[in-house]
């Protein structure tokens, strides 16, 4: 049995480093495009059914995405896959002046390497004969990806994430100003996505330090507002933000216990913890309590807050005491026994 996958089937492959966080990031971004997507996960692969193509948005936004694209054809037989795919599908996906390459990716055992190799040869020959396109392995116009799952084979067109490389280029050690307390660009970007930040929205980091999170808010096209006790770090944040094109930001020296900022769309932050950040004697958890006390003035209705903190701070209990509902919560181990927790709440 084979099925001609209609144009409303897509896929996304996420990195394995933090698979749960990656899944939530993809699902949140999909909801931002259209709340009606149906998503099923097969290890690191999401199969997405929906009306609108989410590929460009996922590639622009998701920190933990490796590649994404369109499912062109689905069949349950690896042997016959190259012959079953109809000519018109090949022609509508690969133009005669274009170049292409083919890769296969086995996701579950039972797909022998020889069968996959002969599929690549057969499919490559068919694409060349049917469309006139030429093979280019290094820099093709079209990347064909054959996903060999346990129960089916998906022939897809795929685009690799450029953002992952950009985020590596924006990690703290590569920024104009560096401080060990700075948030890494990939996690900062994922947190912005969990908070559903959109371009032109105003987003506050009340513990902005050297601006790891602020830089990701700005690179999404939103307007970051950073608050920070330490003047030297605030100057560092401004050096880092200056490297982001068209960034429209505000930086304020102040104390998060007396927030001078109101009516933001979102708060994305990591309160101080560990030896790298000073609280000038205040208990870090008290700073979060002050933030939550004022959350309804700080964040507009319909907005959200995403925080990443040490699990020792018991922030979920604090959030519940203030009557907010946790939308998403996840713990993960970093280094030296430090366990971090990411939490999102909606206002
Ligand atoms: C974990 S670091 C922040 C990293 C930063 N959010 C980033 O994205 O790179 C915590 C920061 O909180 C600042 N801080 C501590 N107490 C504060 C307070 N009461 N008000 C504002 N900032 C404070 C520290 O100086 C430190 O820079």
Image (tube, rainbow, N blue to C red):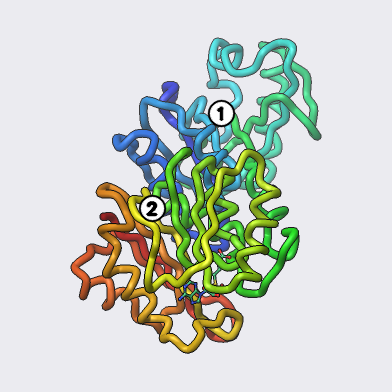
Given residues 13 and 220, the one toward you in this image is: 220
Q: Residue at x 78, y 31 (%)?
A: 139
User: What secondary structure is found at the residue carrying circle 2?
Assistant: strand
Q: Residue at x 51, y 25 (%)?
A: 72
Say if 46 sits above or below 33 in the image.
below
In the rendered image, the quadrant that contains the N terminus is top left
Q: Is residue 153 above or below residue 254?
A: above
Marked residue nearer the N-terminal end (1 or 2): 1
Percent position of residue 109, x then y: 55, 54
Q: Nearer the viewer, residue 20 or 87?
A: 20
* Residue 243: mark in rendering: none
The answer to whether mark 2 is within 8 Å of ligand 1 is: no
Instruction: Residue 302: give x, y in percent of width and height.
Output: 27, 47
Residue 286 appears left or right of 68:
left
Q: Is residue 281 left or right of residue 49?
A: right
* Residue sitting at the far bottom: 281
Residue at 46%, 28% (x, y): give it: 53
The image shows residue 242 at horizontal and vertical percentages of: 68, 49
203 left or right, relative to 217: left
Give the spatial CA distance, label 1 vs label 2. 47 Å
Q: Which of labels 1 and 2 is toward the front?
A: 2
Q: Dot 1: few (<14), some (14–19), or many (≥20) neighbours within 10 Å?
A: many
Q: Secondary structure beneath disc 1?
A: helix
Q: Is the residue marked by circle 2 packed among few (<14), some (14-19), or many (20+) residues within 10 Å?
A: many
| Residue bearing the label numbered 2 | 266
Q: Circle 1 sits on which residue?
A: 81
**Location of residue 144 with respect to 15 vertically, above or below:** above
Q: Residue 22's x, y, as percent?
A: 48, 55
């Amino acid at each position: 049995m084979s099925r001609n996958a209609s144009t409303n089937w897509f896929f996304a492959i996420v990195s394995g480093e933090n698979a749960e966080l990656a899944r939530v990031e993809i699902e949140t971004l999909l909801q931002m495009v259209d709340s009606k997507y149906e998503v099923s996960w097969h290890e690191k692969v999401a199969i997405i059914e929906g009306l609108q193509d989410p590929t460009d948005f996922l590639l622009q936004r998701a920190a933990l995405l490796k590649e994404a694209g369109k499912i062109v054809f689905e069949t349950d037989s690896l042997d016959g896959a190259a012959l079953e795919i109809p000519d018109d599908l090949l022609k509508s996906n690969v133009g005669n002046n274009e170049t292409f390459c083919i890769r296969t990716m086995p996701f579950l055992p039972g797909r022998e390497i020889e069968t996959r190799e002969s599929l690549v040869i057969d499919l490559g020959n068919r694409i060349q004969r049917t469309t006139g396109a030429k093979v280019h392995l290094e820099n093709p116009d079209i990347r064909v990806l054959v996903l060999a799952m346990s129960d089916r084979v998906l022939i897809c067109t795929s685009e690799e994430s450029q953002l992952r490389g950009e985020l590596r280029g924006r990690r703290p050690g590569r920024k104009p100003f560096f401080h060990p307390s700075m948030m890494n660009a990939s996690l900062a970007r994922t947190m912005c996505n969990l908070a559903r930040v959109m371009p032109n929205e105003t987003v506050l980091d009340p513990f902005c330090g050297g601006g790891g999170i602020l830089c990701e808010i700005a690179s999404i096209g939103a307007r970051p507002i950073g608050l920070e006790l330490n003047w030297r770090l605030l100057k560092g944040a401004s050096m880092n933000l200056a490297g982001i094109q068209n960034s429209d930001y505000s930086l304020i020296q102040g104390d998060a216990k007396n927030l001078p900022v109101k009516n933001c769309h979102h708060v994305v932050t990591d309160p101080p913890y560990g030896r790298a950040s000073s609280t000038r004697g205040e208990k870090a958890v008290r700073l979060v309590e002050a933030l939550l006390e004022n959350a309804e003035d700080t964040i507009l209705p319909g907005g959200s807050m995403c925080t990443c903190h040490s699990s020792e701070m018991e922030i979920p209990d604090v959030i519940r005491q203030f009557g907010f509902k946790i939308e998403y919560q996840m713990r993960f181990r970093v280094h030296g026994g430090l366990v971090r927790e990411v939490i999102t709440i909606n206002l």
